[in-house]
Image (cartoon, rainbow, N blue to C red):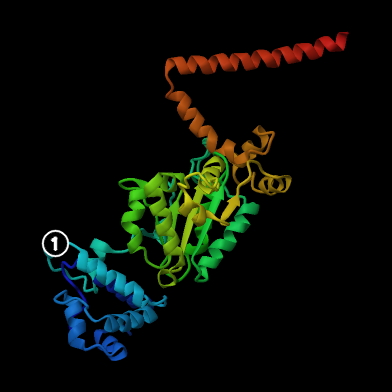
């Protein structure tokens, strides 16, 4: 019997079957054959053969549900629901004519062409090991010239990390969830989300990471959200760019709400960050006679916020001191800051220096004047102290 390989198909139904077939082969090697699939699903082998080559598309919803359930069981993931398959079939009926079939290859996997064209968005999470390479918008840290140090400093977990871990653990257990980290600039929100991914990266489930940005952030979500597969992390750093635009933002929020409550498509995990003022804009409830431009966003974000404080607590600083010998950047941050704003020093200084280096002459002159004024104030304070000693 020929392998599953629907050449040139752009069918969403076949793309989803392709994904399930591939995951089934990963999790149940040796068991996944068309013959066994026909036996379990009670769908004729000739029908499966038509789907496999792309010569025919599924038309019988009951057959499709049975085949999907069998593949999902092999793949060790929740089976798509009847509603899921029905939605994909409707989308296929409305799609434009398929593109010409690609050349044959030796891959031999069901849906190779379909998954390449319309596979689930995102990257396999196990491959996402560098936040800078994948453009996840984690701040770079200060560079002290120490050879051998990794790009990111040693991480010191805090109270918000424990709260975030609970949300991620719930998603790993099968419950779709959203976590919104709310804090000021350079307080460690995005870095905390990056650390939380470690809880999912080595799990047996095929977790993916989707960071929608092209052509614009809200448009990217609206284009790809219908193809999001189970075990997907939706990365919404600076969530105001996704949710604040009036009409598009509300469509994004509504789509995310639907994704989170659709059990047939879960589990999914939404990781988002916001500054406090943006959180207030998106969640404040207007007066009875006022328009409500962010009703969907408010419901999406209700009760999922986790506060990220501006400063390390004494307990956090004590934990940090235990890592200072391992990473000199932590020690310098602890020495140079008096108010516990460790992450601002680690992540904010490179940004400020870059802006200063590229500033216009007029801007640099203003900065120099401010520096001189600050030195003058410090000198006057010292002089005043000494004068008081002689009075």
Secondary structure beneath dot 1 equals loop
Out of 20 and 314, give the one closest to the viewer. Answer: 20
Instruction: Count numbered badges in the picture.
Output: 1
Q: Judge whether residue 144 can be spotted in this image.
A: no
Specify whether 235 is left or right of 280: left
| Residue 14 placement: quadrant | bottom left
Crowding near the residue tagged with mark 1, few <14, some 14–19, many ≥20 C-alpha atoms within 10 Å: few
| Residue 162 placement: quadrant | bottom right
Q: Which residue is drawn at 45% across and 14% down?
A: 362
Q: Which quarter of the rendering shows the C terminus?
A: top right
Q: Which quarter of the rendering shows the N terminus?
A: bottom left
Specify whether 50 is left or right of 362: left
Q: Which residue is drawn at 46% across and 68% down?
A: 267
- Image x and y of residue 3, in percent: 20, 79
Q: Residue at x 71, y 47 (%)?
A: 318
* Residue at the extreme front: 289
Residue under numbered circle 1? 99
Out of 64 and 377, give the one closest to the viewer. Answer: 64
Q: Judge whether residue 323 can be spotted in this image.
A: yes
- Image x and y of residue 218, in percent: 37, 49
Out of 116 and 143, give the one closest to the viewer. Answer: 116
Please determine whether, in this image, residue 73 is positioned above or below residue 143. Answer: below
* Residue at the extreme right: 391
- Image x and y of residue 269, in percent: 47, 61
| Residue 106 placement: quadrant | bottom left
- Image x and y of residue 29, in percent: 34, 80
Q: Which residue is drawn at 54% across and 42% down?
A: 275
């Amino acid at each position: 019997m020929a392998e599953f390989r629907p050449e040139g198909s752009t069918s969403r139904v076949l793309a989803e079957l392709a994904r399930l077939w591939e995951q089934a082969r990963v999790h149940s090697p040796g068991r996944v054959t068309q013959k066994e699939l026909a036996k379990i699903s009670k769908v004729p082998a000739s029908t499966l053969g038509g789907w496999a080559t792309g010569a025919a598309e599924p038309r019988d919803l009951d057959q499709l549900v049975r085949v999907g359930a069998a593949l999902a069981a092999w793949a060790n993931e929740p089976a798509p629901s009847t509603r899921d398959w029905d939605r994909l079939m409707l989308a296929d009926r409305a799609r434009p004519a398929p593109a010409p079939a690609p050349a044959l290859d030796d891959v031999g996997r069901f849906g190779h062409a379909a998954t390449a064209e319309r596979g689930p968005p995102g990257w396999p999470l196990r491959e996402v090991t560098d936040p800078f390479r994948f453009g996840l918008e984690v701040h770079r840290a200060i560079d002290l010239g120490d050879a051998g140090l990794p790009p990111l400093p040693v991480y010191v977990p805090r109270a918000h990390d424990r709260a975030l871990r609970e949300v991620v653990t719930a998603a790993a257990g099968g419950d779709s969830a959203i976590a919104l980290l709310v804090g000021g600039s350079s307080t460690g929100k995005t870095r905390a989300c990056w650390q939380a991914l470690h809880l999912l990266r080595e799990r047996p489930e095929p977790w993916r990471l989707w960071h929608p940005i092209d052509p614009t952030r809200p448009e990217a979500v609206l284009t790809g959200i219908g193809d999001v597969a189970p075990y997907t992390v939706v990365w919404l750093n600076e969530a105001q760019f996704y949710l604040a635009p009036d009409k598009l933002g509300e469509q994004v929020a509504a789509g995310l709400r639907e994704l989170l409550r659709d059990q047939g498509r879960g589990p999914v995990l939404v990781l988002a960050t916001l500054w406090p003022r943006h959180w207030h804009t998106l969640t404040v409830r207007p007066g009875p006679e006022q328009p409500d431009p962010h009703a969907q966003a408010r419901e999406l974000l209700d009760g999922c916020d986790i506060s990220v404080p501006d400063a390390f607590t004494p307990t956090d600083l004590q934990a940090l001191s235990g890592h200072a010998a391992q990473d000199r950047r932590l020690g310098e941050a602890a020495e140079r800051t008096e108010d516990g704003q460790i992450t601002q020093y680690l992540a904010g200084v490179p940004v400020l220096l870059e802006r200063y280096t590229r500033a216009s002459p007029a801007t640099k002159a203003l900065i120099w004047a401010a520096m001189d004024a600050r030195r003058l104030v410090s000198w006057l304070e010292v002089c005043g102290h000494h004068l008081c000693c002689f009075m």
